[in-house]
Amino acid sequence: MVAGPERAVKPSPSLFWPDANQEYTTQDMHELAVTQSIIEIVNRHAEQASATHVARIHLVVGELSSIVDDSVQFYFDYLSEGTACAGAELVFRRVQVQLECRECGATWQPEGADWRCPTCGLARARVAEGREFYVDSIEIEET
């Protein structure tokens, strides 16, 4: 395994259109920029480790991060061609939303849109977990 975690949120200034005839949503563009960032991060670490091929990339994704696994996988398969990441398996680990009450300190996982504290009843929650998105680790194949 090679270093981690590193945030994968820096969008690339360039736009990439795999199919000029297809319509793309804002969500698609978000996934594109995120995937470009993942590939840049992983390729940089692979190069530092003198690795020529990455076998697996472990990603941590919070439920509130708005990351769609299938979209990332789609862009990854296309954008990684010709890089050390080509053919690597993406392993997604989902992190559920965990809230913490700013009033009494209780922690809980919300059900639906009700974010009131189950202990004191106040709506003073902060997100403790669930917004994460980062490259946790990469696995390289020795050649």
Image: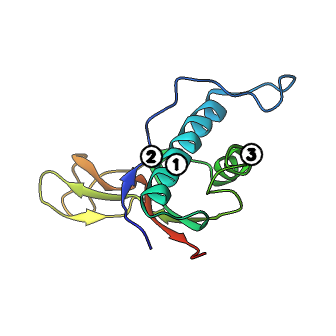
| Residue 18 x %, y % | 78, 33
Amino acid at the residue labelled 3 = Tyr
Q: Are marks 1 and 2 in contact (CB under 8 Å)?
A: yes
Distance in Å between CA atoms under marks 1 and 3: 13 Å
- Circle nearer the N terminus (1, 3): 1
- Circle nearer the N terminus (1, 2): 2
Position of the N terminus by quadrant: bottom left
Amino acid at the residue labelled 1 = Ile
**Residue at 44% across / 46% down in the picture?**
8
* Secondary structure type for disc 1: helix
Q: Which mark is residue 66?
A: none
Q: Is residue 61 left or right of residue 56?
A: left
Within-10-Å neighbours for mark 1: few <14, some 14–19, many 20+: many
Distance in Å between CA atoms under marks 2 and 3: 18 Å
Distance in Å between CA atoms under marks 1 and 2: 6 Å
Amino acid at the residue labelled 2 = Ala
**Residue at 83% across / 23% down in the picture?**
20
| Residue 85 x %, y % | 62, 57
Quickly name the residue at label 2.
8
Quickly name the residue at label 1.
38
Q: Is residue 27 above or below residue 50?
A: above
* Secondary structure type for disc 3: helix
Which residue is more in the foreground, 31 or 79?
Answer: 79
Which residue is more in the foreground, 90 or 87?
Answer: 87
Position of the C terminus by quadrant: bottom right
Q: Are marks 1 and 3 in contact (CB under 8 Å)?
A: no
Q: Are marks 2 and 3 in contact (CB under 8 Å)?
A: no
- Circle nearer the N terminus (2, 3): 2
| Residue 74 x %, y % | 73, 48
Within-10-Å neighbours for mark 2: few <14, some 14–19, many 20+: many
* Secondary structure type for disc 2: loop
Quickly name the residue at label 3.
78
